[in-house]
Image: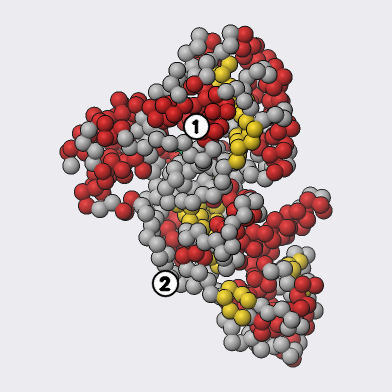
Amino acid sequence: MPSPHQILQSVFGYSTFHGPQEAIVTHLVAGGDAIVLMPTGGGKSICYQIPALVRPGVGLVVSPLIALMQDQVDALKELGVAAAFLNSSLTTDEANQTERAVLTGSIKLLYVAPERLLTPRFLALLDRLDADGKLGLFAIDEAHCVSQWGHDFRAEYLQLSVLAERFPQVPRVALTATADTMTRQEIRDRLHLNGASEFVASFDRPNIRYTIAERDDEHRQLRAFLSERKGEAGIVYCLSRKKVDATAAWLVKSGFQALPYHAGMDSADRRANQLRFLRDEGVIIVATIAFGMGIDKPDVRFVVHLDLPKSIESYYQETGRAGRDGEHSDAWMLYGLSDVVQQRRMIDTGEAEEQYKRVARGKLDALLGLCETPTCRRGRLLNYFGEPQVAHYRCGNCDNCLSPPETWDASEPVRMALSAIYRTGQRYGAAYIIDILRGNANATVKVRGHEGLSVFGIGRALTDLEWRSLFRQLVALGWVEVDTEGYGTLRLTTAARPVLRGETPALLRRTADTSGAKRDKKPRVNVEGLAGSALALFERLKAWRRDTAAADNVPAYVILHDRVLREIASGRPSSLAALGRISGIGENKLRRFGERLLALVNDA
Ligand code: ADP
Ligand code: ZN
């Protein structure tokens, strides 16, 4: 039997394991149970695929994502692995055929939907395999679906504990990209994985560049961002269906290949759009957060948030859909204080219990803190997930590291702002308070007689934009709280007292320059990194891949990833051996595509 390492090289074409992969594989091959926490793109699949190939019999992969099974199985077949799936998309005949193939031992990896696995008929089939010692392992993917608190909860997942009782000697591995300790404990309890070893990978996604900017002119900012990313695939998240439709239409009008996706659409249209996003190159999908679970596309180059997500967890999960292939990608978000007010109102007016609302408010505040931090975004994110960073950690790949925001002593204007809130009776939102500070004697100000206040017009030295930034930071710092009953009314907290008394100085970040003049200093490593004949070759390789993928009826990335094509284009391998050394080209792909790829290189 080949060793895990040999399989990694010959089947998958990779030279080394990443992070805890090797330890996990060794543990499972030896028959142990495991809980695996790894970020999206961290390489979870290999952790159960290789043990399934090494161990006798078939490895069962339980996944709730029916739409994904086909692609995963296609990808394995392209690698020369005997894989199949069983779910409701198959006809009875097809399903019977697959079951027979499993019983005769000609399938090494079987993907199965939980509801199918739990049928008496299927459990009986597993009994037969087990009696012959032909059950290699159980992998439970997206294991956080056992959590009743999360929004991915699946009732059938709770019943998967039956596997522990019925097949106690078959190793089980539960995998998830959800990091928090509560979910972790729930997985352990609900799936009866009491003795399982836990493997936790770092949740850092070094290839994702984080940028969070103040919303100023949304369309102009979005166009500027996208115009540097023509032809790349990405997701643009909006909070409402209406905004999804409007944004998609606007993008199309502006010359981008954009499609909408939300729960209010006809389900056939929605599926068609999702499929185009997966199969075609360079499609932008504009979506509500309903879109995402089950998107396994590795070459999503950017995730844009036009509205604030509801927590750091959501932000991390949604941005995590970018760059699964490890290539440079962007997480780009616009936000303003009105987003905070809107999210706050959604929490306050929701049906949930007060205890839950308090947690939700706390999470929103933490996200606001991330938005307003003058320090490294990645450091802040990792800290939040319990990976403490060294002091003054700088990742070098977020907006704050690339162009560090200046801080300034804002004690004086902060005192002005706090007293303006106080003197108007803590009954108004930021926009109105800014009018007062800037001496904007509009109709409302006049009606209320606020022209006569001592704070009226004392803040003319700052622009509207600067004041808005200042108010957001006041909220982020916890000196001011937003009350949503009165439409974003601002109120002082007790923490504001020492500031108001002049005992605590207020060091704030300067308003980010959103004019676009200050661009990323670090050049983006990308397709554009290729020039001249290499670029021409890359384009030819892509055209070949498109045809091959169409012939096999699979997405392009299932044939070969962009990175592999780029390496061929720049390195111009001249022999099969040289081609085989490229990461991502295993024996089967070399056999199938090797000659053709060399011919394409030679034609150049
Ligand atoms: P996850 O399921 O954790 O999101 P995947 O299993 O889809 O991640 O892996 C993400 C990407 O990383 C895939 O393109 C995969 O082929 C690649 N990958 C995984 N492990 C390795 C490795 N050891 N070396 C190189 N690439 C790897
Ligand atoms: Zn950073």
* Extreme-right residue of the structure: 354
Query: Total label count?
Result: 2
Disc 1 is placed on an element classified as helix
The answer to whether 66 is drawn above or below residue 167 in the figure is: below
- Is residue 499 shown above or below 289? below
- Would you call the spot at circle 1 few (<14 residues within 10 Å), some (14-19), or many (20 or more)? some
Q: Residue at x 73, y 71 (%)?
A: 480
Q: Residue, x 72% and y 43% (percent of image)?
A: 182
Can see residue 84?
Answer: no
Q: Which residue is mark 2?
A: 517
> Outermost residue toward the left?
603
Q: Secondary structure at mark 2?
A: loop
Q: Position of residue 313 (x, y in %)?
A: 63, 50
The residue mark sitting in front, 1 or 2, is 1
**Residue 405, can we see it?**
yes
Q: Residue at x 61, y 51 (%)?
A: 387
Q: Is mark 1 within 8 Å of ligand 1?
A: yes
Horizontal arrangement in the rendering, residue 385 relative to residue 487 (left or right): left
| Residue shown at 70% from the left, 56% from the top | 363
Q: How would you rate the neighbour count of disc 2 (Cα within 10 Å): few for under 14, some for 14-19, many for 20 or more?
A: few
Q: Nearer the viewer, residue 87 or 42?
A: 42
Q: Position of residue 8 (x, y in %)?
A: 43, 30
Q: Amino acid at mark 1?
A: Ile
The residue indicated by pointer 1 is 46
* Amino acid type indicated by mark 2: Ala
